[in-house]
Structures are given as structure tokens and as C-alpha cells.
Image (cartoon, helix red, strand yellow):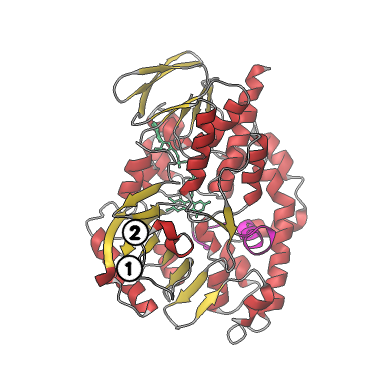
Amino acid sequence: MVVGAGLGGLATALRLAKKGYEVEIIEKNSQAGGRLNQLKKDGFTFDIGPSFFSMSYEFKEFAKDCNIELPFKYVELDPLYTVNFSRSPKTYRLYKDIHKLAEQFKDVEPDFEVKMRKYLKNGKSLFDDTVDIVIKDNYNTVFSYLLTLMKVNPKHLPVLFRNFWQQVCRYFSSDDAREIVSLVAFFLGRTPFDTPAVYTLLSYTEFQHDGYYNVEGGMYKIVEGILGELQKENVKITYNTEIVNFISNGNKLEALVDQNGKSWHRDVIVVNSDAASFRGKIFKRAKFTEAKLDKMEWTMGPLTIYLGLKCKLPQVEHHNYYLGDNFKDYANKIFQASGTLEKPYYYVNVLSRNNADCAPEGCESLFFVCPVPDLRFKKNWDDKEAIVNSIIADFSARIGQDIVPEIISKTSYSPIDWESKFNLHRGSGLGLSHKMFQIGAFRPKNFDEKFKNVFYVGASTVPGTGLPITMISSKLVVKRIEKLKN
Ligand SMILES: Cc1cc2nc3c(=O)[nH]c(=O)nc-3n(C[C@H](O)[C@H](O)[C@H](O)COP(=O)(O)OP(=O)(O)OC[C@H]3O[C@@H](n4cnc5c(N)ncnc54)[C@H](O)[C@@H]3O)c2cc1C
């Protein structure tokens, strides 16, 4: 049985069903997808979380492993996204063609093309030398993991002592180039100032290795596609069912207990709920008490806004970042106790731009993500509406069009909503961060320390967060389960 119908749970269920296991899923919410979810409201369709993915080959491999045609279509993004600063009216378009990209920096960063190629070359080398080792395998012990790490080319050693920002500053000197190149650290849910420099390999993945992809019809097509395949395999999903307790017998989990007191007795359980907080909140493990969870390093909370407009915004592209002029200050405040959020930084996705069905004719479906402190640092969200309105006002000013009179649908989720909807600890959007001591064998494992019949899949277990990485997580956990047979 799989607990949770997020991408990790769905992918694991299909992999197992295809291998002949009898699988069923239970899900807290009334709809599958977890964070990869959809909101349909007032005639508009919104993807509520992910809006693009990288490493498309992980999805292809999933389809191949399951012996199916990939049940959704994806489209490459080029430009990857646009970036706008409050300090200038210029819009940067992040083209994969480095020459075309460099043209836009000719007035601000001398020799941008040469510097970028050098920076990406280093990113490629980091990628080639570390990725397979760190994310593609199961580790039973920290020792075996460290032994494997020792195989990494020692030339990368200095990188271990830098953060993302410091690494970027070695290549670029202008604020524009530094801030744009280091934006990708936010995709990992932290800031360039506390993300290890080794993740500059992500710049290589975005510009050269594989790029970013959008899904035709919206990201939720991924979920609908996998659900269709699960149906063919007769995998039953029970919705509105939340696991709140358990019954054990020594080293065996006998049953999970839902909110109505019903016991679910099953031989093998795969938990897709957050691997750290499930261990603490449900299994009451001493290493994962509330206080210990709070001390771990979590990714930032999202404040998300979903707007339906009764007009078109031809001047806004599909994926866009709007940055202020206090990059470092804002980034640092995200992980400090804070009452107010001055000049939020935000991302805007116009889903209807390439997916006409997601908005009524002549209308636009907009999704905003603003990185904000999680509930450890900002508990009170009574000011949510004021912050949302300030973002909308800032966006209107940036695009030269007041969108307020055009809004016919408006919804927003603060970290409080993200926490309560998907059991995300303190509303952290992407789960545990990827600092060195929270990856590989240091991350909560994909097998349970005590119950031999319990496994974990998803963002806070190995290898980490993000859609393609969650697909790898499903592959790794299935490998573990297969071993039970032997
Ligand atoms: C705002 C936002 C934007 C993002 N953007 C991107 C992006 O553009 N690209 C990208 O690759 N990634 C992105 N991500 C990250 C991505 O969404 C996640 O890494 C991925 O969806 C995690 O999937 P999962 O299966 O691990 O967990 P989840 O999606 O959280 O699924 C877990 C499921 O378990 C259920 N559950 C939890 N507890 C219980 C319980 N006790 N009983 C029963 N069910 C339970 C939950 O309801 C949920 O359905 C984004 C995330 C957020 C929040």
C-alpha cells in the first residue's frame, strides 16, 4: 500500500503494479497529485505548484521501465524564462543559445559569453563527476556513501567550501549577471547564499544538458496520465483518508490507522508523506520530534497566488522572474523571524499563454510564487491579503498595465495552507533542503530504521526534491522493495 498520491506515490505505485505487485493508494485529499496539483475555478485552470521540469529523460526512463508510452506531452522552453529587475526597464531572456544570451549582457558584463562558457564548463564537470554517484543509488550506510564520494575527482574539493553565490562571483562581476545566474538556487528552495556551490551544476542542466520543459495542457496532465495507467492496472485509490496512527508488533508494522479509526493491515507500506515529518508525527521517533524537525534545514515557504484575468497580457511571457534591488537582503530575511516582507521577489507563470484551454477566450490564467519565510519564522499570515495586493500592484507597475480591474478569479495559499493541505512541515514548499549533511546517506532514508516492511518515497527522502528527482526516488524505493523478495 502507498500512503499519499503525490508524484512519488503515483510513480512508485505504477512501477510496482507493472512488476506484478497488488497495489493500492490512500490519499488525505480528494484529488491526486500532492504538490503537483490543479485548481479549477471560475472557468480557469491553474497548476498549483510545479510549472516546469528538468531532466526530461527521467520521465522517459519511467515510461520505458513501465513499458508504456509517456502519458503526457512536454514542450521545451526557450527562452527558459525572463528576468526583470526593479532597477531597470530591461527584460532579460534566458536563451539556451549562449551567444544570443550574451548579447543582452554586453553593456553590463564585459566578456559575458566567455565567462558563461567557462562557468558552464565547470558546471558540466561537476555534473559528470557527481550526479550519478549522489542521486542514482541507494546507500545503506553513511560509510558506504562516503567511500563512494571519495571516488569524486579531488579537483572539485575547493567547491565544497563555497556557497553558490561565492562560486558565481568568481566568474561574473555585475549584479545583473550574478543575480540572474544564481536564481536557480531558489529552484532548490533555498537562496544562493546558503546553497552549496556544487549545485552550480544546475546552471549546466538548465542551459546545456537538458533544459526546462512545460507540459501541454498544464502540468497536471502528468498526474492525469499516470492515473490513467494506474486504472489500467486496477490500482485502487481511496481519497479523503489520512493516516494518523499505527499498530506495530516488534519490527513489523501491523497496520496504519486513519482519521476515522480504520486500520489498514498491509504487508508492505510505502510512505509518500514527508519522510522526516511522518517519522516524527506518526511513528513518534525520537530523532524526528517537533523540536528536532524544526532544527533541520528546510526549504522556504511558498506564497502562491492564482489569478484569472478578463484580458490578455501579450507583454508577459510564459515564465518570468521579477526581482527587486535588495537581492541579498531579501534572501537573508527569508530564513529569519520577520513580520513584514518588503518588496517581495516573485515568479509569474502565464499558463494560458501556451495552453489556451486553461482560460476562457480572451482571458489569462496567472500563477505567482513568492519565496517567503516558513512558519517557524513567520507564523502569522493575517497580512496575506496585503502582501498579495502589494505583489499584484508591483506586477502591474512592472508590466505597465493595471491588472486589478481585470481580476475575475483570485485565490492565494500561504505556508499555512501548504502545511495543512499536504502535511508539509511548517509549510516548507520543497521539503528538506539539500545542504551537504541532508543529502545522500545523510537524508532520511528510503527504508524505515525499525519496521522492515516500511519504505519512503518523495521529496524529503533520497535523492531529493523536484519532479524528476522524485521520479528517481520512485526507482530507488522499488529497488529496495524488490530486495525483500530475495
Ligand atoms: C509552489 C511550488 C512550486 C514548485 N515548482 C516546481 C517546479 O517548477 N518544478 C519541479 O520540478 N518541482 C517543483 N516543486 C517541487 C515539487 O512539487 C515536489 O518536489 C514534488 O511534487 C514532490 O512530490 P512528492 O511525491 O514527494 O510529495 P507530495 O506532492 O507532497 O505528495 C505527498 C502526498 O501525500 C499525501 N499525504 C501526506 N500525509 C499523508 C497522510 N498522513 N495520509 C495520507 N496521505 C498523506 C499528501 O496529501 C500528498 O498528496 C514545487 C513545489 C512547490 C510547493
Identify the magenta region: 191-211
Crowding near the residue tagged with mark 1, few <14, some 14–19, many ≥20 C-alpha atoms within 10 Å = many
| Label 1 within 8 A of ligand 1 by Cβ | no
Whether residue 67 is situated above or below residue 301 in the rendered picture: above
Identify the residue at image location x=43%, y=71%: 322
Image mark for residue 305? 2
Whether residue 403 is situated above or below residue 74 in the rendered picture: below
Task: Say which amino acid is labelled 2.
Answer: Ile
Q: Where is residue 133 drawn, in percent x and y? A: 70, 44
Q: In this image, 163 relative to 394: left or right?
A: right
Q: Is the stretch drawn in magenta largely helix, strand or loop? A: helix
Whether residues under marks 2 and 1 lie with C-beta atoms below 8 angstroms apart, the answer is yes
Q: Which residue is mark 1?
A: 391
Q: Is residue 456 visible?
A: no
* Cα distance between the residues tagged 2 and 1: 9 Å
Q: Where is residue 458 drawn, in percent x and y? A: 52, 39
Q: Quadrant of the C terminus?
A: top right
The furthest residue to the front: 361
Residue closer to the observer: 69 or 187: 69
Q: Earlier in the sequence, mark 2 or mark 1?
A: 2
Identify the residue at image location x=32%, y=53%: 414
Q: SS class of the residue under badge 2?
A: strand
Identify the residue at image location x=52%, y=54%: 216
Identify the residue at image location x=48%, y=34%: 272
Q: In this image, 114 relative to 332: left or right?
A: right
Q: SS class of the residue under badge 1?
A: helix
Q: Is residue 168 visible?
A: yes
Q: Where is residue 258 drawn, in percent x and y? A: 34, 24
